[in-house]
Every structure is written in C-alpha cells, then in structure tokens.
Amino acid sequence: MLINFEEQIGKLRNVRSGKIKEGYRLDIPHIDQHFRLKKGNFNVILGHANVGKTTVILYLMLLYSRKHSIRWLVFSSENEPYSLIRKLVEFIEAKPINKIEDDIFDKRVSWINDHFKFIEPNDLYTYKQVLELAQHVKNAWHYDGLLIDPYNSLIKDRNVLKGLSGHEYDYQATSEMRIFCKTNNITIWLNTHAATEALRKKHGANHEYAEHPIPPMASDVEGGGKFVNRADDFLVIHRYIQHPRDWMYSLIHVRKVKDIDTGGRPTSLDEPIRLKSVINNVGFEINHRNIIEPFKEKQEEVPF
C-alpha cells in the first residue's frame, strides 16, 4: 500500500507554519520540556527491579487522566488490580487509604472506574493475546493508552517463535505493538527490566553516588537494543534505593524522543526529572509542592 502523499505534505506544511500539534502537556515545566504524551506513540520504559517503576508510571498516567481525561487500559502482571486502584486513590487524595472519608473514597473509585480498566493479571498471555484483548476492549470502550507491565511477564507465542531467534521474536513483538499504536491512535507504555549485568555497573569513586548502581542506559534493557530502536520515546526510571538521603527521589531519564517537533527532548545525562516521594508514599512533589494539588484544585468544582 502506498502512502497518502497529500496527507504527508499537509503534515509537512504544518511543520513549516508552526501549526504542528504538540503532545499533551501537564503544565509542569520540569516534565513538559522533556516528555509529552502523544497518541500513536510506542514508548518503552526501563529500570532496575524494585526502584518503583510501576508507581511512577501509574502516577504519570493519573496526571494525564486528571489534566486531559486520558483513559487507560492496564495490564500489570506483577500487581493485583486492587493495589493499583488503591495507589490511584491515595495519589488523588495525597493521604493513606485508611485516612480517606467514605464518601470521598466512593467518588474517587467511581472516577477511576471511568478512566482505568484492568486486564486480569493472573492469566498467562502472549503479546498477541494482549493486543487482541486490547483491540476487543477498544471496540467496546474508548481508551487512549495501554500499559503493558512488564514485557518479560508475557509468555512466548510458539507460533510466532517458530523459526525466529529470541532477538527476531522481540523485534516482531515490538513492531506489532508499534503498529497497534498507529492503527488505533493510542499510546502503548511498555515497561521493561534491565539486564542483570547492568546492575553491576556502579558510579566511580569521585561521583556523588559512588558505588551505587548507575541508571541503566537504553542498551541495558533485557533483550537488547531493539527496544530503543522501535520506541518513539524511551524513558529510564531510577532510584538510589540504598542512599541514606536521596532514596526518596525517583529520577526519570528521558533517553530518546523521536519527534521533538511535537514536544519533548532528552534529559541531560546527570540532570533527570526529579520526583520526591511525599510522606507515606502517596504521591510526589517537585520544588516542595505536591504535583497533584493543582489538578485537584481544578477538579474540585466538578464531581469526578
């Protein structure tokens, strides 16, 4: 099939005139200058085990939902759905679940049900089965983003694997996810783990985080470089979990932004987006202000 040439030239004219549509902003400069949510994009997220990747990802998803009414389909095989719903409620209220009044709790879970749907995590799926299920849900319920968390929890599809190497299989899987994004005009956020050897890489003696594991590079993803090659945007989430002072900071390194014309650019190597966990781990703050507060204040006028 050939491209629609006039459609492509129309996009080029928009670039020339400065009318190209940018990705969704959060009106948080520390985030917006480096990352935007863009429908149709295939995004890969990388990090070491136990640094809180899913927590950070879920928080970002919530921010886009609150700001732009973005709706999400979630497959998270390492977390029970009720625990994710709990985190969303706590994030919105910035307080532990047992400190939230009953009527407020009911309103929050109702709003969450309107914006988040969850795939049963206790079944085994291939990537094709997840995409087929996602298409089935898409046909019945409009959503804008799909979280697959993590990639290595998906079992191999033997029909696809037949005759392919592991590298070729992963390339096929990520290519189909990328096509799914474009076809359905949604974003996929694919959470991945770093290879074991990446955890052995430590900061040098003269670094402020000497002897602590360094944030993984894009090439450190378990399975190799095809993930960053296929991704539109590539993020690394890191936390110095054994540092006596900075363990509460989640660091987002934006390693790749394929289309900077629509917003975003990679972070400098030692200047990531820094999110500080608030007390009781019920949210994050930047510059001493809880990030969710402006969204909460805006939404209070309208029940959600």
Image: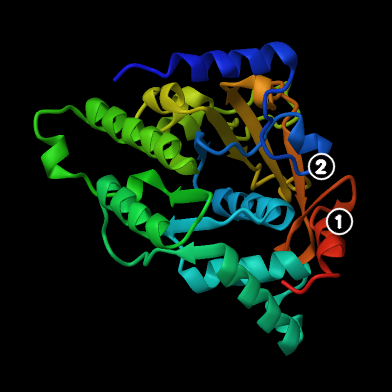
Q: Residue 166 or 85: which is nearer the viewer? A: 85
Disc 1 on helix, strand or loop?
helix
Going 80% across and 70% down the picture, which residue do you hit? 302
The type of colouring in the image is rainbow
Residue 203 position, x and y percent, is 63, 26
Label 1 with label 2: CB-CB less than 8 Å = yes
Rendered image quadrant of residue 234 = top right
Rendered image quadrant of residue 157 = top left
| Crowdedness near tag 1: few (<14), some (14–19) or many (≥20) residues, C-alpha within 10 Å | few
Residue receiving disc 2: 27
Going 60% across and 39% down the picture, which residue do you hit? 237
Q: Which of the marked residues, 1 or 2, is nearer the chain's N terminus?
A: 2
Residue 283 versus residue 234 in the image, above or below? below
Residues at marks 1 and 2, CA–CA distance in whole angstroms: 10 Å
Residue 227 position, x and y percent, is 41, 28
Disc 2 on helix, strand or loop?
loop
Amino acid beneath label 1: Pro
Report if residue 216 is visible in the image: no
Residue receiving disc 1: 294
